[in-house]
Amino acid sequence: MTENKILEIKFLLLPFAIFIFVLTIFENLYVFLLVLAIFLVFYIYFTLKYKNIAFLSLLLFSASLSFGSYMYFLQSIYFQFEGYQKQFVSKKFSIDDTLTNHRYVWKDEFWNYFVLKNLAQNYEIWTKIKVYGMYYPIKLEYKNFQDFIQNKFLSKNIDWKNFQNIWNFDWTKYLVMKGMVWTVYSKKEYEIWKEKLPLYRQLRQDLVNRTNEVYSWYDDKYKALSLGLLIGDKSYLSKNLYDEFIHSGLVHIIVVSWWNIMFLIIFLSMILFFVPFYPRLFLISWWILFYSFMVGADSSVIRATIMGLLSLIALFFWKVTDVRRILALAFIIMLVYNPYFLVYDLWFILSFLAIVWILVFNKFALKIDKEEKILSKLKYFYNNYVLPTLWASLFTAPAILFWTKQVNLLAFVASVFVIPLVPLLMLNSFILLFFPLDFLLKLNIYMMDYVFFFSKVFSDIFAFFIQV
């Protein structure tokens, strides 16, 4: 084994992921040091065997990187915790996102996030409101970051009885992962007023308004699916329709992911063909960042944005794009940004699992002979749609089963029928925003009905669920 192979990024991933996992699950320094000691023994062995200190260097770097990112994340959370009092007389907020059961995610002018509960009315995303009510911290155990460090993270007494419950979903930590440490309870009225939004928010609102106009004569489900495909906005989906997408395994088409970023890169490359190469890459990169802010920084958006930007950087230096290396870098960057992604964000886990196993089993792809016209098209469909969908569905099923307690084993069949239509549906939905031609609109309605049909069929009739 050469030094170059030893220094490859894949040797950093395993200890880094394990250290992050230990920190977010056990939140105890001594457990972290125990795992570090175990890794140290193995790394010293490999270091002596190959006469190279690269293993030790990677171990210490991964340990310090995981510990530093985790501590920085917690400090930022508790800084927000210390910056507020329990009760506010008046506060300005904007609604950033909708949760289930009429719960909303709010953001104030200082970019602190809140969860609003017990709201009787429905408000649109990006609406500015004034709130009168009580604010309660989601976590009450510690009043400041120093108390947290002394009493919890450096605790000498580990409650081993709690270890058997570490796999249970923790709503508190899920909210902390989202940067939310406060819950709003109020029975009073909420005053709404018009206020100028930032450019990226205003553009999103304009897109929503334009979509409303395009589908004004049709059921809201068409508007909901169009917004889901373009910007991942699920706020207009009814609960029944959203449940159908989940149970049929098609919910991934209404989540912003690599599809959206690739569509944006291809579209911008086409309309900016006259711009010189390097300025064009800069403009495309800028629009990718702008788009990610517009749709919201969920884990799937962050991953797709990082991978897209890294691919463009590789092109800037005329380097061959290595998907595996870019995926590994995205994994590390995201966990440095938010360590809780690894344990409490299902979309983070599913997106990486799907791509990893698609890459691993890509060797089963069939060779295409261009002289065989019909057979080559069938092989192309198999290689690009059937095979990736099969492996992605198969190896994400355990994670879905673990998180949701049920999984539809026939979900990949629905994806095989629907996924080939998604690029055309996205393109047509985007064109309709600027050119709402009647034949394009009817074509979109027919394609959406096709998607709704398979979502309904595979969530009800051809649903084969395993439950735990």
Image (cartoon, rainbow, N blue to C red):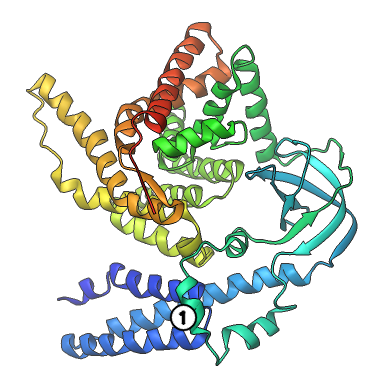
Quadrant where the C terminus sits is bottom left
> Which SS class for mark 1?
helix
Furthest toward the right, the residue is 89
Judge by depth and name the residue closer to the eye, 258 or 394.
394
Residue 313 in sight in this render? no
> Whole-percent x and y of residue 50?
17, 85
- Residue 23 position, x and y percent, is 49, 76
Image quadrant holding the N terminus, namely bottom left
Name the quadrant containing residue 212: top right
In this orientation, does residue 55 appear? yes
Q: Amino acid at mark 1?
A: Ser
Using residue 402 as the reference point, say whether residue 172 is left or right of it: right
Is 302 placed left or right of 211 in the picture? Answer: left
Residue placed under numbered mark 1 in the picture: 64
| Label 1, residues with CA under 10 Å away: few <14, some 14-19, many ≥20 | some
Q: Position of residue 57 (x, y in %)?
A: 34, 83
Residue at left offset 39%, top offset 70%: 17
Name the spot of residue 457 as percent of width and height, x first. 38, 26
Residue 430 vs residue 235: left or right?
left
Q: Is residue 304 above or below residue 65?
A: above
Residue pushed farthest top? Answer: 438
Residue displayed at 10% across by 26% down: 370
Q: Give above or below for 54 relative to 358.
A: below
Q: Which residue: 78% across, 40% down?
A: 120
